[in-house]
Structures are given as C-alpha cells and as structure tokens.
Image (cartoon, coloured by chain):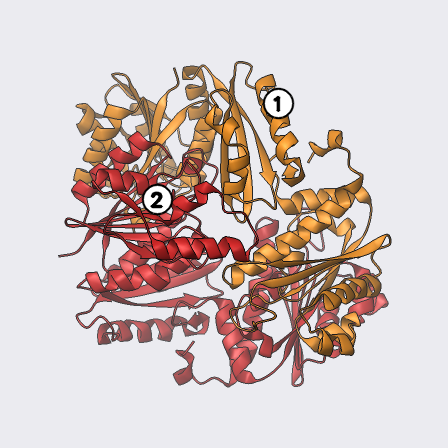
Chain colours: A orange, B red
Amino acid sequence: MTMKSEIISVGTELLLGNIVNTNSAFLSGELAKLGIDVYFHVTVGDNRQRLMETMGEAIERSDLIIITGGLGPTSDDITKETVAEVTGRRLIPDEAELTKLKSYFERTNREMTPNNIKQAYVPEGASVVGNDNGTAPGIILEHNNTTIIMMPGPPIEMKPMFYEKIEPYLRKKSSNSLVSITLKFFGIGESSLEHQLSDLIESQSDPTIAPYAGDGEVRVRITSRSESGEKVPESILKVVSEIEKRLGDYIYSYHDRSLQQVTAMLLLKSGKTLAVAESCTGGKLSTLLTSVSGVSKSYMGGVVSYSNGVKQSLLGVNRETLIKAGAVSRETALQMADGVRRVCGSEIGLSVTGIAGPDGGSINKPVGIVYMALSAEDGSWVWERKFMGNRDKVQTFAAKNALNHLRLYLSKGITSIDKNKY
Amino acid sequence: MTMKSEIISVGTELLLGNIVNTNSAFLSGELAKLGIDVYFHVTVGDNRQRLMETMGEAIERSDLIIITGGLGPTSDDITKETVAEVTGRRLIPDEAELTKLKSYFERTNREMTPNNIKQAYVPEGASVVGNDNGTAPGIILEHNNTTIIMMPGPPIEMKPMFYEKIEPYLRKKSSNSLVSITLKFFGIGESSLEHQLSDLIESQSDPTIAPYAGDGEVRVRITSRSESGEKVPESILKVVSEIEKRLGDYIYSYHDRSLQQVTAMLLLKSGKTLAVAESCTGGKLSTLLTSVSGVSKSYMGGVVSYSNGVKQSLLGVNRETLIKAGAVSRETALQMADGVRRVCGSEIGLSVTGIAGPDGGSINKPVGIVYMALSAEDGSWVWERKFMGNRDKVQTFAAKNALNHLRLYLSKGITSIDKNKY
C-alpha cells in the first residue's frame, strides 16, 4: 500500500503573497519519485489555533506529514510547540543541539539571546535532524501511525536537509518507487488530445496516463511503479508506442524537454547556421533560442525589424511589397526570412511578422494574425496562423510556432528510431 | 469586520510537483490590497472525494473562497461539478457562453468535441465571468453567506480575469479597503534598503511599510486603511517623502509599474526613436521593450548580434576591435550602440555585450561580465557590470540594467515634481 502524505507550509508571509511557495512543489516532486502519494498542500499562518486545526486534520487523514517553516527563534515560530501540543508531548532540550548552538554563537561572535535557545527544544521522543545551513534543526517524529517531519522554511536550508537526511529516511519506509516518461506535444489542444486518447485514459490502472497543459503546450505523463526503480518498464513503453501511433506527429520530446531545447539540439546536430528576423514577437523568438547554452555554435543572431524602415534598410524588404501587401503578409514574411539569411550569411533564415495587439488590427488583418517563413537552400515556406489572447499570449504563441516550424524542418531527416532521443 | 478568505488550487499536477503554485501568492497579494484576510491556501488534486471534503470545510470556515483550476474541458476537470454538489445546485448551460464557445471553434477552424460543451455549464444561480484568454469561463456564486469564485488555473487566463472582473466585484464587497502605494527600486538590494529604512519599519503601525524583493527588483509597499477607499491618505504621503529623501535616486516607479513600462513611457514622452543591439541577452532587451503595447511609435527595432560576423556585417563593428579588445569589451559595446543607431537611423542606440555563461568565461572576462553602451546626439556612455547567477539570471539582469541606463538618460530632464507620474 502506498503512503498518503500531505505537505503543510507555515508562515504568514505566504498568506500575504510576499513570497511564492516553492517548497510544496519541490517536496511533491521528490515524494512522487519515492512512490509516495501527496494528497494535500496546506498553507497556514503563524497562528496557534489555525495551526492546531490544520495539524489535527492532517494526523487524522495522512500517513506522512511534512511541515516546513516556523522552526526559527522568534516568538512567531510555533510549529514545534503546536506539534507537541497536538500529539500530547512535552518539549525537551536536545543536549547535542544545545552544544552546537552555543558553539555557533561563540564562533560567530554573536550573543545567544534566550529565544535562540528554544531552537534546541524538540518534542519528546522525536529524532533531531542536523541543519548544516542554518541554526534551526529538523525533526522527525513517529506518532502512532503517522510520520511527522519538520524542516526549516528557507529552501536553501530545507533542500539540502531533505536530500541528505530526509530522503534516505523516507526511501527506507517506502517500498515502491515510480518511474515515468513525459511526452511533450505541440500543435494539439489538451481536449483534442484527451479525446483521441480517451479509451486509454479511461481504462488506465498501471501505468497511469495523465495529460496536462501549460504555456500553450500539452504533456502526457505515463507512470508506473517499478521494483528496480531505474529501468523504464515494458508497460510504459507499450503505452508510449500506442500514443505514438495515434499522435506521433505532435510529439516533440520524450524527455520533458522544452521546445527550444529540442530545436536547438536538432539545429546543432544539423551543423547548419541560423538567423532570425522578427517583427511582432519583438525578440522573443531569439530569446527562446538563446536561452539554450551552447546554441551560439549554430545561431548567428538576427534582426528585430519592428519598423518598416528597419525591414527595408537591414533586411532589404521591398518597399513596393510593404505598400501593396503590407508589413504583415506572406510576401513580407518570405522577404524577411530571405533577407536575414542573406545579410547574416546563414544557411537558414526564419521570420515572424504579425499583429500582437491590442491595437493595430483591421478587418483584413485582425489582432492575432501571424505569418512565419523559413528560407533555406532547398526552398522557402510560409505559414499563416491566427492566435487568440492578449499581447503576451500572441507573442509567445507566434514565437513558439515559428520555432516548431524550424524543428519540423530540421527533423525531416530524423528517423522514428532516433526520434525518442529528443 | 474583515472578510475571512481562503484560496483553493485544484490540480493533480500541483501535487505531483510538476508546476509551482504561483496563483495563491498572486491572489493573496491582491486580496491583501483589498483588506481581505487570507487564512488558508489548500491544494487538492482532481479527485471528487477530497475536493468535496476541502470545499465543505472551506464553506464552513470562510466568507470568501477563491478556487483556481479544474474548469477545463477534460473529464479530470471537476471543480464546477463538485461545487454544484456541495452547494446542492444543478449545473445548467449558459446560453451566452455556449454561443461564444461555438463561434470560437468555428473561427479557429477546430472541431468542437463533446467535452468542450461542458465548459459552458454553470451551477444554478451563479454569474458567468467571461474569459478573454481561453475557453473556460470564470464563475461567481453567492451561496448563503459565502462567496465562491472559480477561475481557470493558467495564470495567463486567471490574472487578466482577476484584474478585469473579480477585483472590481470584491472591491465593492469589502467595506474597509486598504489604500497602498508601491514604490519600486532599481540598483539597491533588499537588505541594504531594509537597513536604511529600519527605523521606519520598526516603528510602523499605520501606515504599514513592507519591503519585498523579486526578479532582481525591490519594492516597498506602504499601506493604510481608508474610509473613502480612493484618495491616498496624508499618512502614506508623509512616509513616501521620507523614503524619497533617503533613497530617491533608486526609485523608478510610484505606481508599481515595471521597469519596461516606465522606460517606454519616458521614451514615448521624449519623442525620440530607439534601436538596440544585443549580444549576450539574445533578444531579451528587445522583448522587454516590445512587451509594452504602443512602443512601436518610438522603438524601431534592433539587431541580435550573437556572432562576430553579424557584429561586423550588420553593425559595422571594427574587425580590429573584435580581435584586440574582444567581442565582450567597452569598445565593442560602444561600436554596437553607435552602429545600430546608424543602420536603423534612430536617435538613440543602446547595446549589451557580455558572457551569460555557463561556458565562455575566462580569467579576464569571467562569466557574468557585461558591457552596456548608449549612443545619442549629445554623447555616448559605456558601463561595466559583473552579475552573479545562472545564464537566465545574467541575461535578465543585463537586459534590465541596460533598460535602467536608458531610463536614467531619458529622465534627465524630468523634475522631481513630475517623477511620481511614473
């Protein structure tokens, strides 16, 4: 049977929105790897009554509770005190921690105020987990059938403590690890994807199949329990090949890589050089490409031709074309791709021109219309798309779609056997 | 009496640690501005029983419940269904949403599968809140003494919906609004700022003074309760002028605007034209500028001169300079700024060249070193900086610092009386 767990984050600063809670996502990802199910995240302030309520509920419904925050020296920090109260235990000083604390303050020439001493107190029966990056130790408490783990809130203290002390402890408790493969799709919506995989999703048990969307991309995670904990089980590979049969054209990564990573990998493998010309995306396409370290071997740079003047002077777009077909047109997109390839001396030229909005649209050229072109030795291509959403969304979709066209061009020679390297 | 609220995030992907929950922090910050207390954040998966449990508890203890996620078309999306069940209401089709949905699929030439239709169903008695950036509408339901608000999970849909539709609704409900001014600082660290304002922060009661950091920028929020709900109280203005006295040079916005917004406003006001040349930032500087709608009146475009070849061919950087001083040098930065100004025919040229890492550093030119230059009719300037952090951080810091140099150049003529317009 799998362990049911929940993660409790303590701190009023989280409820005021001053900081984003990254601990819960980090811990969830790590627990998933250990095959431990996370059922709830709860965030609660430095308030005795509400913390008691949250703790009491958690002990009733979960096998494992991980609490971060509220272990520090100030009077606001009441996590340990509340856990002691809920579990009916006294707080007693831990001699080793007390000594460590004293020597820390001596070493750093700081005065140890009384409230610092409270950091060395732990609930009776608990084990102390040393903190190599701060003064508040972690605590493991086995209470009836529930494991309660407390760690400091700052990720810089919590993460190393988790990897070094807590993860090995939990690994021993949890017998079965999970293995998963994440396929990434481009050019298909979440609902359409789910519709085409509905029979697989409905009949799932092992492996589980979970589609989810974000940033205009769709992922499917296929997960199975594995005894060995390492090798991808045959059951996962069978589902992958069935999904490939149905939606293979949309898959761009078998390893949860970003579109820019996969495209940059293909570009570097091709040995070809690239330059881009962009208008409505304003630099976003280039930013995506240059977010990948090492792309400079193939990516030469580009032109952000925001004004018509720059389209003419730097890219050599025809003045006639700009007047007759317009700056947002198939013709201009093609001339931009040809032009940037010529002026940068690259083997491939990629371009985007469109209307990001909210202003600048017309009946013939509404907000969201985008033209993308690719120019290379073996030909040139142009695509028209209409994107929905606000300015940021149109710019992001346009840049990613242009990138995807480049990816498809570059993967023309890639056989299906090689595909799953990306 | 203040409203007690809680925020519920729905989605198994959150509990698997696939994505970080940023919605709760965003909503908490916005609710704080409205004087609404947030007592809990709860994250729960796409599971009927646990969602029922979470919803039932929330209705008992909170006056306002904001739920994000689980409104989409797939069978996993069960937020509305569960709210309907817990509140004892039927789900009925909203005709306006149904029409909108049909026309959306017609317009985008996509097939409307049956599971899409469920997005237009709402609990009886609820109000529908249109979604301008996606297909799933938001919902407001007044149930007994509890307000239940449901919004889509993707931040790109949720945030505009909150600002345009939900915030005004809540502002009316919340009797004692908070009024706050958010000063934004550039070029000073959070701890240094806190140190210089420590006496003000320690003695605060009304107004409250809250410094917080993020994205390499520092904010100070000064908040006071206000009966009128609109006018900024004298007590806030007094604190603002004291902070100005101490740290005025670092303040770039009095209205929580982004650095790119303020810089674009100043650029448009100056009536001058701008072009940028960037190397290590790979398009990020241009992307920041073009994220602001309407900037095309002044921003002409630029060159991403990633390779030395492009620096020479498109920007006319001297070959000698590239060999002797190097691509990452004061000299190259200046020639890039001059060059882009000349080839684009703009009045101002702005450039960045540096080493974003993780590779490419040397003893003389370590990873993180960046040169920025500005060229204009009245002179040219160059700055050297060394940034810490990973590739993305160095690129972001470099782009923002270049932007800040441009802002300072453009605000030379701005008197202090006008300053607080930005």
Q: Quadrant of the C terminus of chain B?
A: bottom left
Is residue B57 positioned above or below B207 on the image?
A: above
Disc 2 packing (10 Å; few <14; some 14–19; many ≥20): few
The x and y percentages for residue B287 are 59, 63
- Which residue is at the front of the view, A2 or A14? A2
In the figure, B276 relative to A350: above or below?
A: below
In terms of secondary structure, where does tag 1 sit? helix
Name the residue carrying label 2: A110
Q: Secondary structure at mark 2?
A: loop
> Mark 1 sits on what residue?
A237
Task: Work out whether residue A226 or residue A376 is closer to the camera in this orientation and state it.
Answer: A376
In this rendering, do the residues under marks 2 and 1 share a single chain?
yes
* Disc 2 versus disc 1: nearer the observer: 1
- Residue drawn at (41%, 74%) of the image: B248
In the rendering, at what x and y percent does residue A372 appear?
69, 59
Q: Is residue B97 above or below residue B229?
A: above
Q: Earlier in the sequence, mark 2 or mark 1?
A: 2
Q: Quadrant of residue B161?
A: bottom left
